[in-house]
Amino acid sequence: MATNRTFTMLKPDAVANGYIGAILEKITAAGFRIVAMKMTQLTKADAEAFYAIHAERPFFGELVEYMTSGPIVSAVLEKDNAVEDFRTLIGATNPAEAAEGTIRKMYAESISANAVHGSDSDENAAIEAAFHFAGREHF
Ligand code: UDP
Ligand code: MG
């Protein structure tokens, strides 16, 4: 399996609850290399653009409000089979359904405030990384 990249955000609940270090430890212990990382706070326009695919979903307004509610840590991660393996590491969208030991099971508050984002395809990983980072911010 080729080495490739995925994109993640430690969402406002994870940052506010003091879980940055614990979550990054789990990510690196699982074999991911951090190739870009920074702390930012999304504007409403940023969050609406990032989650544009969900614009018609009933939870969109709540999602945008939540994602702009405080700082996030965004990062690009590299590993063999990165996208799929990272989705396995974070667990199901709803932490109540996430497997034991997954990041969402351990650290998420709710289906909305679910601690972490993980890209769902190689194509979206590249789009999402480019949304958050300039080329010179990747290592
Ligand atoms: N979300 C929500 N309510 C739902 C489903 C999703 O608030 O019923 C939020 C949640 O923060 C989720 C994000 O919208 O992570 C994007 O949803 P998606 O279905 O893409 O889940 P993910 O890929 O993050 O597991
Ligand atoms: Mg998704």
Image (tube, rainbow, N blue to C red):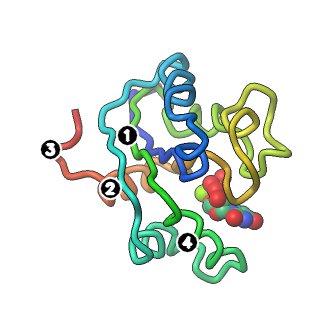
Above or below, 35 relative to 108 = above
Q: Earlier in the sequence, mark 3 or mark 1?
A: 1
- Disc 4 to disc 3: CB gap under 8 Å: no
* Pointer 4 residue: 64
Quadrant in which residue 2 is drawn: top left
Q: Amino acid at mark 1?
A: Val
- The local crowd at label 4, few if under 14, some if 14 to 19, many if 20 or more residues have their Cα within 10 Å, is many
Question: In this figure, which residue is indicated by the disc labeled 1?
Answer: 76
Q: CA distance from mark 4 to mark 1?
A: 21 Å
**Residue type indicated by callout 4:** Val
Residue drawn at (49%, 33%) of the image = 82
Q: Position of residue 14 (x, y in %)?
A: 58, 43
Residue that badge 2 annotates:
132
**Placement of 129 over or under 49, stated as above or below:** above
Q: Secondary structure at mark 1?
A: strand
Secondary element type, mark 4 = helix
Across the whole image, how many numbered discs are drawn on residues? 4
